[in-house]
Image: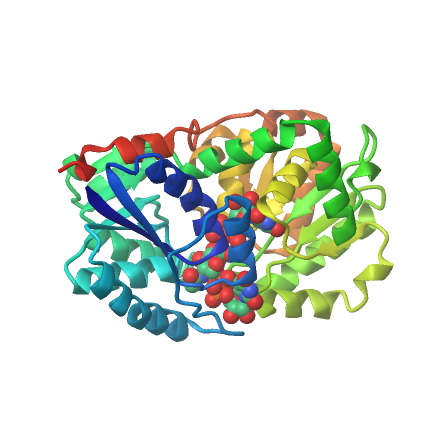
């Protein structure tokens, strides 16, 4: 029997680790599965844990308002010292590129616990974009004894860094496992759809406004490297779009980071007065997946959304200068537009006005997975050694 501990702390890690927890728990005679959340996020993490019915064994509860990178790193490290000393897991599984991921890897390494990296090998090779994620994931790659890479390209990135092929497995991204779980629930019956519509309406957007004529652009944004001028530019692009396309709805479920809220407040001091602009609170995963499926296109700087949208056949304009997820860009459904107001406006207009461009960008493709990533990870022979 191997003791597995999954450690994560933010919304996207929870979405991508929850199906893996469920998969490990299907094998109680093979694995003792423990879950430790750092609480780097609070409300946004809880939303995901509730949706997947995951009850953590430990919650370090480290989040504080306006936390900086020192706070997160040091609190995760010191919190995990005791958890690891007490539980002595055989394997610690971390995910992706957050500061929780990097600090948990280092904390496990300090007790010589084996670290396994899920969503390994994504790279821009620009240490300031995304910041600090590029260095977070590179540090974790140095420490990990095994790497679950989502795609061939991410495996190749690891090979280029002299990581042995024998300790890399291509599994697909667990985000597609999560997406399929959510879609199955959404499509299970009409009552669920009615319930979702009522919840989203309660939060400020009535999906029933949408029909074959009425389109909706879904927006998310939260990257640290966009804070300041980048975010102001993004907000100004949204303003210009909403003014130029009054018949289109623009819906932005806002991240709870105060840096995001402050930029929105300064560009839209009274956004409730703009009829086609809807700034709403962060949605639960099920509701957000439903809104993605109802959208015309998505404007985002999110990593997870870049992976989910192509599966749903939705074009994505990425408000960043780099991406570690080139697969959908190569396939033509995702385009990098940076954080320049005019460029965001022009590229969005092009997809709104040019049907040929739009249809081309709507190809449903699955470069990131087939929904069986968790099965492959749990079946990997490292866990039986
Ligand atoms: C973090 C990750 C980023 C990931 C993102 C996903 C790092 C350095 N950043 O960025 O890689 O893409 O999560 O969303 O690991 N807050 C709340 N409630 C919450 C969540 C956040 O109030 O549930 C507020 C708090 O004031 C908190 C602030 O947001 O201090 C920033 O949270 P933090 O995790 O440091 O940064 P994110 O921008 O969320
Ligand atoms: N998401 C969500 N509710 C929202 C916005 C996003 O559940 O209101 C989901 C989205 O489907 C994706 C994940 O959150 O799976 C992305 O999280 P985020 O953009 O915060 O982080 P990133 O992926 O950029 O690290």
Res 321 seen here: no
Residue drawn at (52%, 37%) of the image? 308
Percent position (x, y) of residue 340? 61, 56
Residue 75, above or below 242:
below
Percent from the top left, x then y, of residue 271?
A: 80, 61
Q: Residue at x 44, y 68 (%)?
A: 61
Q: Nearer the viewer, residue 31 or 61?
A: 31
- Give residue 23's position: percent from left, percent from top: 37, 36
Q: Residue at x 34, y 47 (%)?
A: 123
Q: How is the image coloured?
A: rainbow
Position of the N terminus by quadrant: top left
Inspect this view and state whether residue 142 appears.
yes
Give the position of the C terminus as an image quadrant.
Answer: top left
Residue 196 position within the rendered picture, expressed as x and y whole percent measured from the top left: 70, 40
* Foreground residue among 228 and 179: 179
Q: Quadrant of residue 231?
A: bottom right
Q: Quadrant of residue 261?
A: bottom right
Name above or below for residue 377 compared with residue 124.
above
- Quarter of image, res 184: top right
């Amino acid at each position: 029997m191997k003791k597995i501990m999954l450690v994560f702390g933010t919304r996207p890690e929870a979405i991508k680790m929850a199906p893996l927890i469920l998969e490990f728990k299907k094998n109680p005679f093979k694995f003792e599965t423990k879950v430790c959340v750092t609480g780097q996020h609070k409300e946004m993490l809880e939303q995901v844990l509730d949706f997947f019915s995951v009850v953590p064994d430990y919650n370090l509860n480290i989040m504080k308002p306006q936390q900086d990178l020192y706070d997160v790193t040091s609190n995760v490290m010191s919190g995990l010292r005791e958890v690891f000393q007490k539980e002595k897991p055989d394997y610690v599984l971390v995910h992706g590129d957050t500061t929780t991921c990097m600090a948990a890897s280092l904390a496990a390494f300090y007790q010589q616990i084996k670290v396994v990296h899920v969503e390994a090998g994504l790279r821009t090779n620009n240490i300031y974009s995304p910041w600090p994620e590029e260095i977070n994931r590179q540090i974790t790659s140095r420490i990990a004894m095994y790497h679950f890479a989502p795609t061939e390209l991410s495996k190749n990135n690891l090979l280029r860094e002299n990581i042995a092929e024998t300790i890399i497995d291509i599994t697909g991204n667990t985000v597609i496992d999560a997406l399929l779980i959510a879609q199955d629930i959404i499509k299970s019956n009409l009552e669920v759809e009615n319930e979702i519509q009522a919840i989203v309406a309660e939060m400020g957007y009535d999906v029933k406004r949408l029909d074959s004529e009425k389109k909706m652009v879904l927006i998310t944004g939260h990257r640290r490297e966009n804070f300041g001028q980048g975010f102001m530019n993004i907000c100004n692009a949204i303003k210009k779009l909403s003014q130029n396309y009054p018949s289109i709805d623009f819906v932005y479920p806002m991240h709870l980071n105060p840096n995001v809220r402050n930029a929105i407040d300064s560009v839209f001091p009274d956004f409730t007065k703009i009829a086609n602009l809807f700034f709403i609170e962060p949605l639960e995963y099920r509701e957000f997946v439903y809104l993605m499926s109802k959208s015309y296109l998505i404007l985002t700087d999110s990593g997870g959304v870049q992976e989910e949208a192509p599966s749903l056949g939705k074009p994505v304009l990425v408000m960043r200068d780099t991406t570690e997820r080139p697969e959908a860009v190569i396939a033509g459904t995702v385009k990098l537009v940076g954080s320049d107001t005019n460029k965001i406006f022009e590229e969005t207009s092009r997809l709104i006005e040019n049907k040929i461009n739009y249809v081309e960008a709507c190809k449903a493709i699955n470069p990131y997975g087939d929904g069986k990533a968790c099965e492959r990870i749990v079946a990997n022979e490292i866990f039986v050694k």
